[in-house]
Image (cartoon, rainbow, N blue to C red):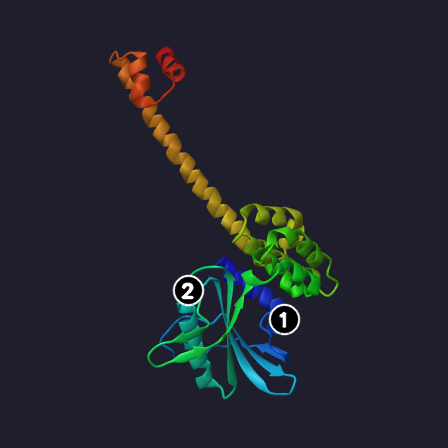
Amino acid sequence: MKYDVAIKTVFKRCLKHLLKSLCKLDISECEDIERKPEETTSLRRLDLAAQVTFKDGKKALAVVEYATRWTNTVALKLLEYRTRYKFECDLDIISIAIVLTRGAKEIEIYRDNEVEYRYKFVRIYELSAREVIKSGITCLYPFVPLMKDGIKYSEEADRKIYEAEEFGREEKADLLTGMAIFAGLISKDLTEKLIERRRDIMVESAAYELIKEEGRKEGRKEGRKEGRKEGKREKTIEIAKNMLELGADIEFVVRSTGLSEEEVRKLMDE
């Protein structure tokens, strides 16, 4: 969920640049299509649909599905969305699958007994972080942690986003927050470093709420874990007290409960 929100946030800020540089579409204009086809049997919603205009004036509709890791349902989802939008408009459809990290065996052409379906395939993890940094395309920098040598170049990508003159503070907040969330797929430590460095600006991004919620969930999880441990210890101590009251010697209580000899002696003194 949080990765979907992160990638949508980054695409919202950089739609044209990412369709051109990441998806290799030679376009001059693009527009996000907010509405979705109605009267369908599925409640699934496409990650992104954008009407694009190529430099020769020809228009098309790009349908994009993101996935943190490849599953065979990605191609089927794309095919479903393509069919929906084809019913609604007369434009050519460009199907694009974007996969963030390496997963199961990927297919670039879906085939079954009736259908052969081709789509553009973008593997973020196969891109070179070094080359992306050299390209100067700031909109690609949030994805740097996921690329080859991504951890090595993440600090530089973070700095370049923060210093980018073409973006305002709100745009930078979204891009930096997206980068921190993506980093979580590779390294929890890197995510923490990125958040610590740019927390002052990240808090202005709506996507930052996801990071805070993740922290709250982790805190509740740890709290429950500690609570269970404390409850188990209290029960063990109660058992040890009962054994001592029944006349069991210290060595036997230690072996039976796992408490230390010092802990058992303290119970005897209470």
Report the residue at 55% width, 65% height from top. Answer: 8
Q: Please, which residue is most extreme toward the left here?
A: 246
Q: Position of residue 114 (x, y in %)?
A: 34, 81
Q: Position of residue 219 (x, y in %)?
A: 48, 42
Report the residue at 53% width, 52% height from top. Answer: 186
| Residue position for label 2 | 71
Q: Is residue 231 above or below residue 8?
A: above
Specify whether residue 38 is in view: no
Specify whether residue 129 is in view: yes
What element does badge 2 sit on? Answer: loop
Left or right: 149, with 45 as reference point: right
Left or right: 266, with 92 as reference point: left
| Residue position for label 1 | 21
Label 2, residues with CA under 10 Å away: few <14, some 14-19, many ≥20:
some
Residue toward you, 128 or 198: 128
Q: Quadrant of residue 258?
A: top left
**Quarter holding the C terminus?**
top left
Residue at mark 1 to residue at mark 2: CA–CA distance: 24 Å
Amino acid type, callout 2 = Thr
Residue toward you, 220 or 110: 110
Q: Position of residue 82 (x, y in %)?
A: 45, 79
Amino acid type, callout 1 = Ser
The answer to whether mark 1 and mark 2 are in CB contact below 8 A is no
Residue toward you, 178 or 75: 75
Q: Position of residue 32 (x, y in %)?
A: 57, 75
Q: Please, which residue is most extreme toward the right here?
A: 165
Q: Earlier in the sequence, mark 1 or mark 2?
A: 1
